[in-house]
Image: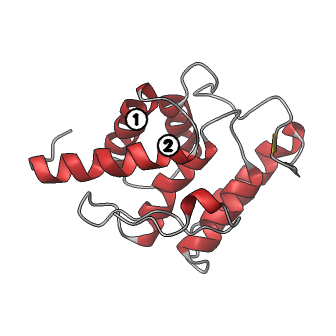
Amino acid sequence: MGERYTATEIRRLTAWAAQECEWQLVGPRKVAYLVDAYFHLATAQTISESTVMELGHIVEPDWNDRTRWREVNVRVGASVKPKWENVPALMTMWLEGLGGNAESATATFQDFEEIHPFRDGNGRVGALLFNWFNDTYAPSDLQYPPNLWNDPRREGVTL
C-alpha cells in the first residue's frame, strides 16, 4: 500500500464501503473486497482498461474476469443494459473519452453504469471511479455517487 492511513481514515473507508455494499444488497465479505479495490486503485496513475477490469475482478472475483468484460446480457431492475457483444467497443469509447476531462465525475459515473461492463459489482466499481474523477479519493473525502436512478435506499444518507 505504500501510503499510511490513520485508524480514523480506515474506519471511514470501511463505513463508506459497508454502506455501498448494503445499498447493493451484498454481504459483509464484499466490504473487504471493496476496500481491497480501493487500495488497488489508490496506487494507479491512470484509469486504463486493465485497471477497470482488475477493479471488477477484485470486487467480484467469482463473477468477473480480470481480462475481459462481461459475456452475458444483464439488466438492473427494468433497465436492460447494452448487449454483451457491444460492451468492449462501448468501454473503449468510455475510456477514450476520459482523456479530455470534458465530462463531470457524475456524467462519467453515469455513462459507466449505463454500460455495466461486469456481470456484478458495477455499482461498487462505479463508486470508486466516481470518487477518483471527483477528486474525492482520500478516505477523509470519499463521497457516495449521486442518486441518479432515484433509489429510495440512497436518500438522505451521508457519511
Is 43 on the left-hand or right-hand side of 125?
left
Residue located at (82% from left, 38% from top): 74
Say left or right for 41 vs 104: left
Characterize the local packing of mark 2: few (<14), some (14-19) or many (20 or more) Cα atoms within 10 angstroms: some
Residue furthest toward the top?
Answer: 62
Towards the viewer: 23 or 115: 23
In the rendered view, would you say 141 is above or below 70? below
Q: Amino acid at mark 2?
A: Glu
- Under mark 1, the amino acid is Val
Residue at 60% across, 63% down? 109
Q: Residues within 10 Å of mark 1 (few under 14, many from 20)?
A: many
Residue 15, image x, y percentages: 32, 48
Q: Which residue is mark 2?
A: 22
Position in image of residue 47 (x %, y %)? 50, 53
Reading the image, the residue beneath label 1 is 31
Q: Which mark is residue 142?
A: none
Residue 83 in the image, given as x and y percentages of width and height: 90, 42
Residue situated in front as seen by the camera: 51 or 119: 119
Q: Quadrant of residue 75?
A: top right
Q: Is 118 rendered above or below residue 92?
A: above
Q: Number of callouts in the render? A: 2
**N-term mark: 2 or 1:** 2
> In the figure, 62 relative to 108: above or below?
above
